[in-house]
């Protein structure tokens, strides 16, 4: 059974920082691309950042220079370090694990963690 468990969300003031964690089980973690998505009320879910099994990362434009994604394969964990947070970063943040094997796509989601940026 695959589980992705996020933690680290909460309420933070503008300009503050948070670190989200996602602990995975039931998958060969090191073979998956791991991603963080977010969904704000009334908006579609969007990719925030992703990191491949080889360690290459990409970011949504609005978070470049503020957010950093990293992974620790020995702990089956992916992190999202968020700095200089803005009210528009407020959303539910979801962890995703994805792997393509030929025509089969393995795609798993966590339950989400709320991040609220407000004074």
Image (cartoon, helix red, strand yellow):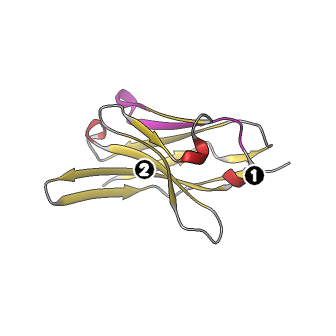
Q: Residue at x 71, y 37 (%)?
A: 84
**Where does the image place residue 104, in percent across and percent down from the top left?**
18, 60
* Secondary element type, mark 1: helix
* Label 2 – label 1 distance at C-alpha: 26 Å
Q: Nearer the viewer, mark 2 or mark 1?
A: 1
**Where does the image place residue 96, in percent across and percent down from the top left?**
41, 52
Q: Name the side, left or right, on which 98 lies relative to 35.
A: left
Residue corresponding to mark 2: 4
Return the disc, 2 or 1, that comes first in the chain's sequence: 2
The answer to if 109 sits in the magenta stretch is no
* Secondary element type, mark 2: strand
Residue 72's place in the image compared with 10, above or below, is above
Q: Quadrant of the N terminus?
A: bottom left
Residue corresponding to mark 1: 87
Residue found at the very far left of the displayed protein: 102
Q: Residue at x 30, y 43 (%)?
A: 32
Q: Residue at x 62, y 36 (%)?
A: 66
Q: Residue at x 70, y 47 (%)?
A: 10
Stretch of the chain drawn in magenta: 71-85
């Amino acid at each position: 059974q695959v589980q992705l468990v996020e933690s680290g969300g909460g309420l933070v003031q503008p300009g503050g920082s948070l670190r989200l964690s996602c602990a995975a089980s039931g998958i060969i973690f090191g073979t998956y691309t791991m991603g963080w998505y977010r969904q704000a009320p009334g908006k579609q879910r969007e990719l925030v950042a992703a990191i491949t099994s080889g360690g290459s990362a990409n970011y949504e434009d609005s978070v470049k220079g503020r957010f950093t994604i990293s992974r620790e394969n020995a702990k089956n964990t992916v992190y999202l370090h968020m700095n200089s947070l803005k009210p528009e970063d407020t959303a539910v943040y979801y962890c995703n694990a994805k792997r393509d094997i030929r025509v089969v796509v393995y795609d798993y989601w966590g339950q989400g963690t709320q991040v609220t940026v407000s004074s």
